Amino acid sequence: MKRIGSKVVIVYFLMTVIACIVGIVMVNITHPGVGFTLDNMQAFDTSKVKTPSFVNFFV
């Protein structure tokens, strides 16, 4: 179990590092959110929001 457990931890760590690198590279390539402004957005009126019932929440 010690060998397998250590290999699992190493692979998990390496996959996490690779996922972070891929994410950072993709953000630098695609630049998401550029040009998006909130100038034309209207204020959100929370008084019109109805709370769903317990059953509708899960449906």
Image (cartoon, rainbow, N blue to C red):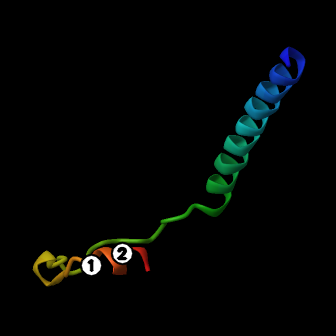
Q: Amino acid at mark 1?
A: Ser
Q: Quadrant of residue 49?
A: bottom left
Going by the numbered disc 2, the residue's amino acid type is: Phe
Q: What count of labels does the image hold?
A: 2
Outermost residue on the front side: it is 55
Q: Quadrant of residue 32?
A: bottom right
Which residue is pictured at 67% across the width and 42% down the height? 20
The circle on residue 57 is 2
Q: Name the spot of residue 34 as percent of width and height, x first.
A: 49, 66
Residue 50 % position (x, y): 19, 81
Give the distance between the C-alpha atoms of the residues marked 1 and 2, in whole angstroms: 6 Å
The image quadrant of residue 45 is bottom left
Q: Residue lying furthest bottom in this view?
A: 48
Q: Residues within 10 Å of mark 2 (few under 14, many from 20)?
A: few
Residue 53 disc label: 1
Q: Measuring from the top left, give residue 46's x and y in whole percent.
A: 15, 75
Residue 2 x, y percent position in the rendering: 84, 15
Taking depth in this image into account, of 8 and 41 the one nearest to the observer is 8
Single out the residue that lies furthest toward the left.
47
- Quadrant for the N terminus, please: top right
Kindly indicate whether the residue at mark 2 contacts the one at mark 1 (C-beta within 8 angstroms): yes
Above or below, 28 against 39 in this view is: above
At mark 2, the secondary structure is: helix
In the image, 43: left or right of 6?
A: left
Residue sitting at x 35%, y 78%: 55
Q: Which residue sits at x=76%, y=26%?
A: 9
Q: Quadrant of the C terminus?
A: bottom left
Q: Above or below — where is 13 with respect to 52?
A: above
Left or right, residue 49 beside residue 3? left
Does 48 sit above or below residue 27? Answer: below
Residue drawn at point x = 62 percent, y = 55 percent: 27
Front position in the image: 56 or 16: 56
